[in-house]
Image (cartoon, rainbow, N blue to C red):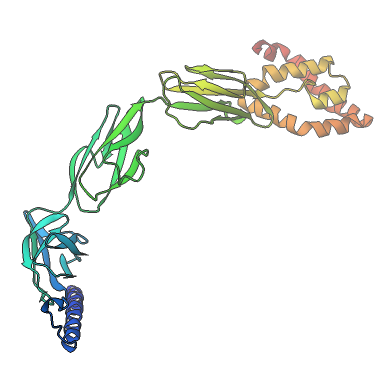
Amino acid sequence: MNGQTRGNRLTGRRAGRLAGAVGLLLALVLIAGVLPVPANAQDIPSFPHGFAGAVSVLNPPGPVPEGTVVEAFVDGVKTAETNVDDQSRYVFLVPGPGNTVTFKVGGILANESATWESAKLEENFDLTIDEPPGFELTVNSTAGGSVTSPGEGTFLWAVAAVVDLVAQPEAGYQFDKWTGDVGTIVDVNAASTTITMNDSYSITANFEEGYSLTIVSSPVMGGTATDVTGASPYQEDEVVSIQAVAASGYQFVRWTATSGQFSNANAESTIFQMPAADATVTASFQVATNPLGCFIATAAYGNPTAEEIEILREFRDTILLTNSLGAELVSLYYKTSPPIAEFISQHEVVRTAVRVGLVDPIVAILSWSYDLWGERG
């Protein structure tokens, strides 16, 4: 039942289009009937010749795709254009005057032609072409990569088809650009883009040697390392701007790389020169140390060079800063302790209590166990 209903709708749609064309012709004829006939027969107005029918391919047999363009030419001059519907049918009015009407389907000359006649309607004027309509797209690539979509070779596409283009570089190469018949390519510099088939085209994906640059931070929580140029992969000897930004509680130390050269390896912002290979560049950070060593202990003892503070510094450098968890604890301490130390330094009673009840016991334990952890240094 659904199929029948759909068929009725399609039939009704075609009938409506034909009726519209017929109605227009009748109206023109009626108008012509009430107008006085000119004395000169050459001055009689002409009316379009109507055509409608099915469009098909002979080899292999079958309909043409919906949307295929049908064009009419009167004595070689294009005078009408339409698109076939989902039933591979067309309808249009072809203005004149003229002698011979020829047709093109998807840019291919149809086998049928007609003699143009004013106000005539041919509703079963079927058109055929010998081969499917469309344009050829020839795709090639240079060394260093390939075209994965639609592939490489020659392909037939429907008229006005939008075709995906994807170029994939090999290791050590990068995509450069599309060359050839690139007038309808959206972006010739993009490895993934599209081309619209308004004609037959031949295009080439071009690749060039290139090397990847990877930027990392060590430790990861120490800060960020950025490829400011941001155009990896790069060519050999190409210069790249890089930047390191230390996180709170950390400080930048230096740049290192698997290969390549820095203009200044000790500068947070510097230039890196690419080698003829993939490269990994590392920004090294360390926990930011304070010349006072320990805020709270210094406040408690009132002397930054006290022997007890030296033991705390040594434990920090030997044990805590050599592992990520200890480094995080030190970083947290330096973030939170300054205001506490300031309060302690301003109150003698609190200073004594912190020294006797907190710092002295910690120093005593570290001094007692020095032979254990001190050997690790």
72 sits to left or right of 361: left
Seen as rendered, the residue at the extreme right is 348
* Residue 68 in the image: above or below residue 243: below
* Residue 179 in the image: above or below residue 66: above
187 sits to left or right of 101: right
Seen as rendered, the residue at the extreme front is 39
Between 361 and 172, the one nearer to me in the picture: 172
Quarter-of-image position of residue 340: top right
Image location of residue 209, percent across then percent down = 36, 24
Query: Can you say which quadrant of the picture contains the C terminus?
Result: top right
Residue drawn at 48 percent across, 17 percent down: 260
Image location of residue 143, percent across then percent down = 27, 27
Query: Can you say which quadrant of the picture contains the N terminus?
Result: bottom left
Seen as rendered, the residue at the extreme bottom is 34
Q: Is residue 83 visible?
A: no
Residue drawn at 72 percent across, 22 percent down: 289
Residue drawn at 58 percent across, 23 percent down: 270
Image location of residue 267, percent across then percent down = 62, 21
Image location of residue 41, percent across then percent down = 11, 79
Between 41 and 252, the one nearer to me in the picture: 41
Between 178 and 339, the one nearer to me in the picture: 178
10 sits to left or right of 56: right
Number of numbered discs overlaid on the protein picture: 0
Q: Is residue 319 visible?
A: yes
* Residue 122 in the image: above or below residue 162: below
